Image (tube, rainbow, N blue to C red):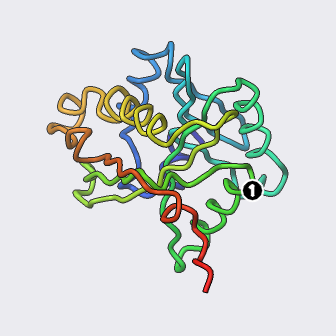
Amino acid sequence: MHWYEKLNKYFPDEEMKSREHMELLLKEKQDIYKKSEDEYHVMMYVEMEDFTFIDYLFVSKMARGKGIGKKLLDDLKQRSKPIILEVEPVDYDDTDTEKRQRFYRREGFQHAKSIGYSRRSLATGEVNTMEILYWTPEDESEESIYNKMKHTYENIHTYKDVELYGEPYEEVDKALVYREINKEEGSGEEPAS
């Protein structure tokens, strides 16, 4: 099966770039947009000088639990720069969303509490809200992660959007928002009684 078909069967329509979009990125942005694949996985990612963005990570059901996802992430972590990705919020009717979030937490990824992200899918017209997760080798600020995410949105997600889809995605400042969170609010712990 072609790598795009594997991704398209696994990810919801509102999250998918078109095949033409992804092939164009691989061709015209080949210095930064990369594909890693074998019979068990497909990973599409952006390799920038100061961060890596995972666009899609798919591991086949036959290979889950065999450490393939962990190895792919460990290989990226060896580059000693932040890794950023988008993930669906947990949907208790879809156990895969909870498993995905648990996997990334186990691999040391943090939820960016200060960053809000939602965009309208040009394929379905649906507004899709995603969570930003990140791993950093050093204590990088969420504001820095936000700026890297904005760069990805402007240079990858919306690349030639009018040409490819017939209309533009929202401006970056509508799709991504940053809200400073104070320490007490962002700790995730209940206040002592």
Q: Which residue is disc 1 drawn over?
A: 106
Question: As displayed, is residue 177 above or below residue 20?
Answer: below
Residue found at x 32% / y 54%: 118
Give whichever of 185, 92 is nearer the camera: 185
Callout 1: SS: helix
Res 188 → quadrant = bottom right
Residue 27 relative to residue 139: left or right: left
Residue found at x 53% / y 44%: 85
Q: Position of residue 23 (x, y in %)?
A: 43, 26
Say which amino acid is labelled 1.
Answer: Arg
Res 167 → quadrant = top left
Question: As displayed, is residue 8 above or below residue 154?
Answer: below
Q: Position of residue 80 (x, y in %)?
A: 70, 26
Report crowding for label 1: few under 14, some 14 to 19, many 20 or more residues within 10 A (C-alpha).
few
Please state the total of marks drawn on the protein image. 1
Give whichever of 95, 18 is nearer the camera: 95
Question: As displayed, is residue 16 above or below residue 97?
Answer: above
